[in-house]
Image: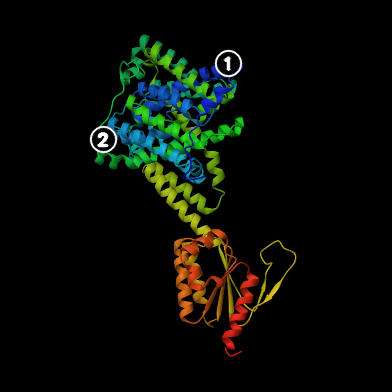
Amino acid sequence: MSLSGPIDFKPKLFSALKNYSASRFKSDFVAGIVVGIVALPLAVAFAIASGVSPTVGLVTAIIGGFLVSALGGCSVQIGGPTGAFIIIVYGIIETFGLEGLALATFMAGLILVLMGLFHLGTVIKFIPYPIVVGFTAGIALTIFSTQMNDFFGLGLTNVPAAFIPKWGTYFSNFGNIDSVTTAVAVISLVIIIAVPLISKKLPGALIAIVIMTTAVWFLNNFFPEYHVATIGDRFGSMATDIPEPKGFKLSMETINLLLPSAFTIAILGSIESLLSATVADGVTGSHTRSNTELIGQGIANIVVPFFGGIPVTGAIARTMTNITNGGRTPVAGIIHAIVLLLIFLFMMPLINLVPMACLAAVLVMVSYNMSGWRTVRGLLKNPKGDVTVLAVTFLLTVIFDLTIAIEIGLLLAIILFLRRVTENTQIKVYSEQLDVAEGTEATTHEVLDVANGVQIYEIDGPFFFGVATKFDEMMRSTMGDKPLVRIIRMRKVPFIDATAVHNLEILIRSSQEDGIHVVLSGVNPSVKEVLEHAGIDKLIGKDHVCPHITVAVRMANRLVSQLENPSA
C-alpha cells in the first residue's frame, strides 16, 4: 500500500478483451442473462425499501451495474443497489429529500475515486472483522423490521423510523393483520426457501414473484374483496424511459450537513465491494485491482445520481450467481445491465402487478442471509474486546444509525487495538549480567558482565504514545539508586512515534542534568532516521548510539570506570 505513485486505474474489461473468444462470450452471455433475471426483483425490492420507486432501483442497477463492470478492477463483480444502503438512503431521503440523496451519493462517489487515487484499496480491507459483522447484522435486523407492515398487511402509513418506536407501533397494531396478505407473504417465503433445495441455479425470488403475482392478479380481479396491495397501488403507473440527466444545487451548508452520510456511503460501499471482490477472487483464482475497483465504484456513484439513482456497490449474492453460472469477465456484468434495460423498456407494466407482500418476503430472506448469525455465534467465542466491538456496532446500527455505528465502532476497535499492543510491549530491566542471545533462537549464549552503575532497559515492541507512558513509569519506579549509565536497548522496536521521541528527549535531558549517560543500542534504520530528525543523536552524542548491545555494554562499563576513577 502506498499513498503516492502513479494512478492505479486499469479496468479489467480492457485486459479481458485482449484474448477474448467465442466460447468465453457464450459463458458470459448465459451468466449475464441469469444474473439480470436474479437482479430484477432485488433492484425493485431494495428501491422500495429505501423509500424510492422501483424505477429508481432499476435505473441504478442498469447504469451503475454497467459502469462497475466496464470500469471496475474485478473481473466478475456485479454492481447495483444493495440491502446495506437501505437504512442510510431511507434516512437521507426522510431528512433531506431526493435532492439531498443525489448530492450525498455524488459526494460519496468523489470520496471513492479519491480513495482509489490515493491507493487506499488495501487499507479498507484492514477494517476489523467484528465491525463489518456487527453493522451487517444490524442492517439485516433493521431491514427485517421495515418489512413487517407490508408482510402482515397492517396498512400503516406513518411508521416511525426509529427501531424501538417502530416495533412499538407494530405491536399496538398487530390486531389489524390482513390474513390474505400474510398468506401471500408466507407462501412467497416458502417458495424462496424451497426453490434452492431443488436447484441452486434457479432464482427463488423471481419464481416466487412470478407465481404470486399471477395468483394475486387473479385474486384482485375475481375476488376484489380480498384485495392484496401491489406496486401499482403504491406507486401508480411508472415511466418506461431512462430519465434525462438532471443536475442538483450545491451549497456549502448542504455539503457540510451531508458529508457524514456521504462518508458512510463511501466507506460502506468500499467495504462491501472489496469484500465481494475478495470472495470472488477466492473462488475464481483471479486478482482484483483494489484501487481500480474503488475508482470504478466511485465513477458509478458520481454518474447515477444525475439520473435519479441511489448508491451503487458490488453485490456479493449477484456476483456469486455470476460466477456459478460461468461468468468470468466484465462482459457478463455488462450483459446483465443490458438484460435489465430490456426488461425496463418492455416489461415495466408487469412490474406494477407485483404484490408488496411478496417483495417483503424477498427482503425478509435477504435480511436473514445478511444477518450472518452463524458468524456472529462464532465471533462470540473470541476475546471480549472483539465481542464488545461487535455488540456495540450492532446495537448502534439498530438503535441509532449506521454513521454513528461505523464511527464509534472504528474508534472502539482502535482503542482496543492500542491497548493490546501496549499490553504486549514489554519493558525489561537488566543489571550485573546480560545474556545477549536471550529472546532469540540462537543456541550459543554470550553472557556480558555489566558493571555496577549500569542499568539496561529493553523495549520489546512498538514504542508509541501508550508505551511511552509505560516506559516513563518504569523509569521512575527504578530510580531508587541512580545509575551512572542507562542503556536503552531498542533492537525489537519496529517504529517510534512523536510522543515516545518527546519522552525519550525528556529522559535524556533529565539524566544529563543528574550526570547520567544515556546509550542507545540496536536501533533499526527506520527508528534511527526518526531519532536523527529529532536531533536525539546530537543530544546524547553520535558515539552513544551503538549498533549492538555488546558495543553498548563495553562503552557503558568504560564510562563507569572513568566516572569512578577520573584520575586513572
Give the residue type at disc 2. Answer: Leu
Q: Amino acid at mark 1?
A: Lys
Total count of labels: 2
Distance, label 1 to label 2, CA atoms, is 45 Å
5 or 267, nearer to the observer = 5
Q: Is residue 226 above or below residue 370?
A: above
Task: Looking at the picture, tell me which residue is in the foreground, 286 or 136.
Answer: 286
Residue 98 appears anywhere in the view: yes
Q: Does dot 1 land on a helix, a strand or a loop?
A: helix
- Across and down, in percent, residue 342 comes to 43, 14
Nearer the observer, 449 or 527: 527
Q: Tell me the crowding category of disc 2: few under 14, some 14 to 19, or many 20 or more residues within 10 angstroms, Cα based.
A: few
Residue at which label 2 appears: 250
Camera sees residue 147: no
- Residue found farthest to the bottom: 567
Rendered view: 524 above or below 174: below
Towards the viewer: 276 or 199: 276
Name the outermost residue toward the top: 222
Q: Position of residue 326 (x, y in %)?
A: 59, 22
N-terminal of the pair, mark 1 or mark 2, is: 1
Residue shown at the point (38%, 22%) measured from the top left: 59
Residue 139 left/right relative to 16: left
Q: Residue furthest right?
A: 444
Q: Which residue is mark 1?
A: 26
**Residue drawn at 62 percent across, 80 percent down:** 557
Disc 1 crowd rating (10 Å Cα; few below 14, some 14-19, many 20+) is: some
In what element is the residue under mark 2?
loop
Residue 416 is situated, as x and y percent measured from the top left of the image, at 48, 55
x, y percent for residue 72: 48, 30
